[in-house]
Amino acid sequence: MWNHPSQRWLILICVICLLSFALANSLHGYANAEGHPVEISATLPGQLKFVHVIYRHGDRTPVDPYPTDPWGDRKFWPTGWGDLTNLGKQEHYDLGKWLRNRYSNLLPPLYSNENIYVQSTDVDRTLMSAQSNLAGLYEPQGEDIWNTDINWQPIPIHTSPERVDPILAAKAPCPAYDYELASLESSPEFKALTEKHRNLFAYLSEKGGRPVKTFIDAQYLNNTLFIENLYNMTLPEWTKKVFGREELTYVANFAFAISSYTRKLARLKAGPLLKDIFQRFKEKSSGSLKPDRSMWVYSAHDTTVASVLNALKLFELHSPPYTACIMMELRVDETNTPLVSIFYKNTTAEPLPLDIPGCGPSCPLAKLVNIYEDVLPVDWERECKLSTMMMTYEEANLGTATGILILIVIALLFASYGLMIYYRRRNYKLYTSYSQMA
Ligand SMILES: *[C@@H]1O[C@H](CO)[C@@H](O)[C@H](O)[C@H]1NC(C)=O
Ligand SMILES: *[C@@H]1O[C@H](CO)[C@@H](O)[C@H](O)[C@H]1NC(C)=O
Ligand SMILES: *[C@@H]1O[C@H](CO)[C@@H](O)[C@H](O)[C@H]1NC(C)=O
């Protein structure tokens, strides 16, 4: 029946088609549980080489309930204060799956520390978020399966204590930053901004049982109410006047802009992180990144997301939600030019590349570094030091200054005494020689 030559050809072609289809599928198979890998390469010039991901942790309990809080008792919350909840774990697991799908062509399906590095602030909820995320990003495949009872494998997460972490936690001491922030907050313009919300702050202080003096104080209270509302806990009557209303929402959102309000604040707060990222982009594109990784992940906070976006002049006033995620992607085009695109995913929608000010959605790396030069510290530690001009009397440490001054005066006295003796002797000698001549 299949003896006719043209029929044989037809079968052969069909078999080849089926085989190549199966092969293509198996190559993509790991990442492709749901949907197809996103064809991001089709929309932007160049080939994707490297991505930096910065995300916020998932759903958590309130950090610190307010004194009159009817839900302020520990018994209402399954975990401790400010901890990741089961919902938060699920959210990050889902984001991990989404990242696997998006970067399936960048990240091999088997884990190796030569492909990825994960860094977290030293806070339980961000560490646990990174773990949940990696459970989705690196479900063990093939050789990585080590125990068939558990669909998970250990992946290292690096961290350092907050007080010594100027990069991600951005909580290492920086006196020049504190000075700059204090002068912003005491400026007439800023005081006028605060004054506008005086009635709201007074209301929140009275009802909440704790002074609310700043945007940040108000943001914390808003956040506790936000979480309790999310958990369907009935909020007290007084909150109806403020919670979910325009003014408090604005104040809570605005608080995220303060820590990076001026370019100098942005430079000292978000600058070290941006500098590291840009440096790695440079090394990757010149072939000197070791190990030659393709993905670098930072697990952090809403404040991190907001200050990075603000330093990049890409922040639109809002409260970054759980698992809000910035992706900074490096592509290389046919002419070998490194190009950077920045995405922000804060909803379930597919993110679009952001319009980098003065450069567009696909920005040559050299130009990018130029554009943001004002927020890239040259020597962060030195820049964090206060010059004496900025200091108050106490800060300038007058005791030390006086001590040094006294030492200098004593040294000068000794020196002049020495000189005096020297000249006396010389004069004496001269004198004697003259007298001898006489
Ligand atoms: C403050 O509350 C508003 C309204 O519920 C919410 O959209 C926003 O995310 C909250 N901000 C914070 C920091 O909790
Ligand atoms: C709160 O109630 C809504 C609507 O009934 C429900 O969809 C949601 O799951 C509830 N949230 C929690 C945390 O129980
Ligand atoms: C998401 O980000 C955009 C752009 O920054 C912002 O305008 C919007 O308010 C954000 N929405 C949520 C839900 O965070």
Image (spheres, rainbow, N blue to C red):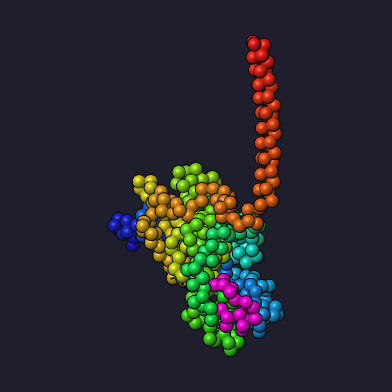
Camera sees residue 370? yes
In this image, 364 relative to 194: left or right?
A: left
Q: x, y percentage for residue 12? A: 36, 56
Give the residue at the far front of this rendering: 438
In the foreground, 284 or 38: 284
From what the image shows, is residue 44 above or below residue 409?
below
Q: x, y percentage for residue 307? A: 51, 62
Instruction: Say which quadrant the N terminus sits in.
Output: bottom left
Q: Which residues are magenta?
A: 201-217
Instruction: Please tell me whether residue 204 belongs to the stretch shown in magenta.
Output: yes
In the foreground, 344 or 162: 162
For the point 58% across and 51% down, the residue is 388
Which is the main secondary structure of the residues drawn in magenta? helix
From what the image shows, is residue 122 above or below residue 242?
above
Instruction: Please tell me whether residue 255 belongs to the stretch shown in magenta.
Output: no
Q: x, y percentage for residue 126? A: 60, 64
Q: Total label count?
A: 0
Give the residue at the far top of this rendering: 437
From what the image shows, is residue 127 above or below residue 243?
above
For the point 61% across and 83% down, the residue is 206
For the point 66% across and 53% down, the residue is 397
Q: x, y percentage for residue 355? A: 38, 61
In the foreground, 252 or 83: 252
Camera sees residue 120? no
Give the residue at the far bottom of this rendering: 237
Instruction: Say which quadrant the C terminus sits in.
Output: top right
For the point 30% across and 55% down, the residue is 5
